[in-house]
Image: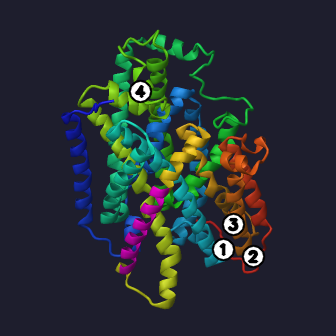
Amino acid sequence: MASSLTFFDWTIIALYLSGVVGAGIILSRKQSSDLQDYFLGGNQMSSWVVMFSVIATTQSAATFLGGPDYGYRGDYTYLGSFVGSAMAAVFVAKYLVPRFYALKVTTVYELLAVRYGANAKRAAGAMYLVGRIFANGSRLYMAALAVAMMLFFDVSPQSVMIATLLITIISIGITLIGGIRSVIWSDFGQFIVYFGAAIIALISLWFQLSLSPSEVLEALSNTPEGDNKLVLFDFSTDFGKPFTFWAIITGVFLLNLGNFGLDQDTTQRLLTCRDAKSSGRALVLSTLVAVPIVFVFVTIGQLLYLFYDRPDLAIADGSGDVLREFSGEKITVFMAYILSEMPPGVRGLATAGVVAAAISTMTSGLNAMSSVVVGDFYQPWREANSPASPHHYVIAGRWGMLLFAFLLSAMAVLCFFWQRYTNMPLLEFALSVMAFAYAGLIGVFFTAIFTNRGSTLSIIAALVCGFLVILFQQSYIVDSLGLPGSFKALSFPWQLMIGVFISAVICLLGNNTTDRALAPPNT
């Protein structure tokens, strides 16, 4: 397929990238003097901008491509998962955020040091790093799919690898120059761009279909396959479906609990607020604001279904042709529409939105992962042997981000083959890989906060076992080891439930003889 991006489109994309770089230069004028400033912005960030940064962190490329993909393949049950998100946000705002602020931590894993000591904190931090490489690597892979189609009009391994490298280089520049301030403001700007692009795409698609609202609703509620694509809550007991109502209030709730409260990638942003109240407000509002955002992306997928799979209804000429040109790569259905059907100029704006989602995916993790390595590992070791200046640790943090940029790029390439082996929808794939770290972390923090049990040894065992429980439920492992097919039959919320339960039981077996109370602050 020949290039469908005009000179006007490329000009818009270039202006966007110039704006991102310019904003980073402005933010870099205020140099970070220490770790508190570099990783937490001096606790001076406004709750409203943190709210949008949390949204950009938890969505980005996963929602930009995965939301339309889910709507195209299925229904609105993913939108119904906001119930689990809201439950988790309230829980974290009430029980975890006040503790983080009372202890004045830089990373959430310092909370375990209060109860069990430094080794427990490092074990949790290490598991976070492993899990975040998995999770952000999968999101980077999806972002690379979009950029590869934009540049090369295919999603071959070579194209995806080159796209991954380009995203990584741009993201490193944004992240290094201004610390968490640069990341948060960059997240905000990129959110505006990629959500604005989604609105433009939705309007463009609606007018191309030339269908009345009643015709759209009728076509989606009664498909030729006999499905109702307007279902919001699925009350069935099919454990293979990821977004049934029962999965939402159990496994999806736990997934968001881990994401909001135990994942430094998100909680670092919450800790940049002035106090616990502002932080909790930003978190809860982010889950509420996310509802209409997710609705837009899933609705795009629903309309793409009518556009490509219902030529008897779609008015637009050439409807359905573009997907066949991409060898059945329906995971990129939204990008296929952007590049082939949207008018020049508008196409450039939408493509800039793809780039924004891609960059937000990468920058969201680099600063957080580096803060854990420096704050929980390098700084304690260095201070015990040869104390250094605060600025030294800022430099160390930048080197840490370079290391993780390489690791995330490698994981993105691995995800290219992993996702194709499972043939899992993009959104489900992105969420499922998060369970690897969360299974152990949730079990450990549950024990630490709500019981008097646990020890450093049982924490380490629980983290490792939680990871292994999720690993042995993956299709490739099940097939390679010849395990029963039932091991891979559960969707990721139920896999996570099993992992959390086993890790919590293992952690409870420990008895901390030097127990220190982890009581909530008086608020």
Q: Which residue is mark 4?
A: 325
Residue 523 shows up from this direction? no
Q: Which residue is mark 1?
A: 115
Dividing the picture into quadrants, the one containing residue 153 is top left
Stretch in magenta: 392-410
Q: Which residue is mark 3?
A: 448
Residue 28: % across, % down: 26, 65
CA gap between label 4 and label 2 equals 61 Å
The reply, left or right, for residue 11 in relation to residue 134 is: left
The reply, left or right, for residue 365 in relation to residue 488 is: left
Dividing the picture into quadrants, the one containing residue 445 is bottom right
Q: What is the secondary structure assignment of the residue under circle 3?
A: helix
Q: Which residue is mark 2?
A: 512
Q: How is the image coloured?
A: rainbow
- Which amino acid does the dot numbered 1 rest on? Arg
Residue 366 shows up from this direction? yes
Q: Looking at the image, which residue is at 39% across and 56% down? A: 363
CA gap between label 4 and label 1 equals 58 Å
The reply, left or right, for residue 290 in relation to residue 169 is: right
CA neighbours of label 3 inside 10 A, class few (<14), some (14 to 19), many (20+): many
